[in-house]
Image (cartoon, rainbow, N blue to C red):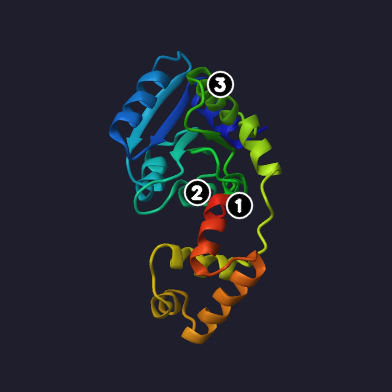
């Protein structure tokens, strides 16, 4: 039996206690209003920052945490990973935008129960929360298809980190400081990135990686 089920049976309650974390007030209010209309779902917390998720969950003991992929301080994936470690009876359901093929891989790495697009039909969201509460993996079919057809990422995690920082506007020296590397090593990384991707230059490599959804 799933640990979340055991916890709910211990409480003697069939209602799915749900935590929502979304930084945009209007979207968060919409999620709360819709899920609260379901007889078997109770929204026990409304948060706007990722670093609030674990502390609130320890106190409120939700069965499901609906987490926006993008949150202030720490993102939804990091929050889901922390929940898995510190409160494994709570299943995480991450919501994000379509078109980023890395989202499903990041969902699995974070031990989240599922990933759905932010523009899914409301009924699909409700059913996803119900399925997540039982420990069933929830994946939007269109997102799964996108991931299967996405181009393979040839970069190592370190090369991708360097390119991501470059895309954010960091200089070679700043990238070296943030990754605890020498400037020469960073230049070598970025040269390898350009060669692996068949890009014309660093800017072209960033464009290719962004179009492929690698960051």
Looking at the image, tell me whether mark 2 or mark 1 is earlier in sequence order: 2
**Residues under labels 3 and 1: Cα distance?**
23 Å
Write the residue at 53% across / 63% down: 204
Q: Secondary structure at mark 1?
A: helix
Toward the left, the furthest residue is: 25
In the displayed structure image, the side of residue 135 where residue 203 appears, left or right: left
Q: Position of residue 126 (x, y in %)?
A: 51, 21
- Name the residue that disc number 1 marks: 109
Q: Secondary structure at mark 2?
A: helix
Q: Secondary structure at mark 3?
A: helix
The relative height of residue 65 versus residue 178 in the rendered view (above or below) is: above
Q: Nearer the viewer, residue 86 or 138?
A: 138
In the displayed structure image, the side of residue 39 where residue 136 appears, left or right: right
**Residues under labels 2 and 1: Cα distance?**
8 Å
**Residues under labels 2 and 3: Cα distance?**
21 Å
The relative height of residue 63 versus residue 81 in the rendered view (above or below) is: above
Looking at the image, tell me whether mark 3 or mark 1 is earlier in sequence order: 1
- Name the residue that disc number 2 marks: 77
- Name the residue that disc number 3 marks: 127
Q: Quadrant of residue 131?
A: top right
Write the residue at 57% across / 43% down: 112
At label 2, counting other C-alpha atoms closer than 10 Å, the crowd grade (few under 14, some 14-19, many 20 or more) is many
Q: Nearer the viewer, residue 90 or 208?
A: 208
Write the residue at 51% across / 61% down: 206
Q: Position of residue 184 (x, y in %)?
A: 51, 86
Q: Quadrant of residue 168?
A: bottom left
**Residue 158, labelled with which disc?**
none
């Amino acid at each position: 039996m799933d640990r979340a089920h055991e916890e709910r049976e211990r409480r003697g309650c069939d209602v799915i206690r749900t935590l929502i974390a979304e930084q945009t007030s209007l979207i968060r209010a919409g999620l709360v209003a819709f899920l609260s209309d379901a007889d078997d779902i109770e929204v026990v917390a409304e948060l706007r920052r990722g670093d609030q998720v674990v502390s609130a969950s320890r106190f409120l003991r939700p069965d499901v945490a609906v987490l926006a992929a993008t949150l202030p301080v720490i993102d939804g994936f990091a929050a889901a990973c922390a929940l898995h470690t510190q409160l494994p009876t709570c299943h995480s359901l991450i919501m994000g935008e379509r078109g980023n093929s890395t989202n499903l891989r990041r969902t699995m790495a974070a031990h989240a129960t599922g990933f759905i697009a932010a523009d899914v039909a409301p009924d699909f969201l409700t059913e996803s929360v119900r399925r997540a509460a039982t420990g069933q993996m929830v994946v939007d079919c269109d997102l799964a298809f996108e991931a299967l057809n996405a181009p393979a990422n040839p970069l190592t995690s370190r090369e991708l980190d360097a390119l991501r920082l470059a895309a954010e506007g960091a200089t070679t020296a700043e990238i070296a400081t943030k990754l605890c590397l020498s400037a020469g090593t960073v230049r070598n990384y970025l040269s390898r990135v350009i060669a692996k991707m068949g890009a014309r230059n660093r800017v072209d490599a960033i464009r290719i990686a962004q179009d492929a959804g690698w960051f």
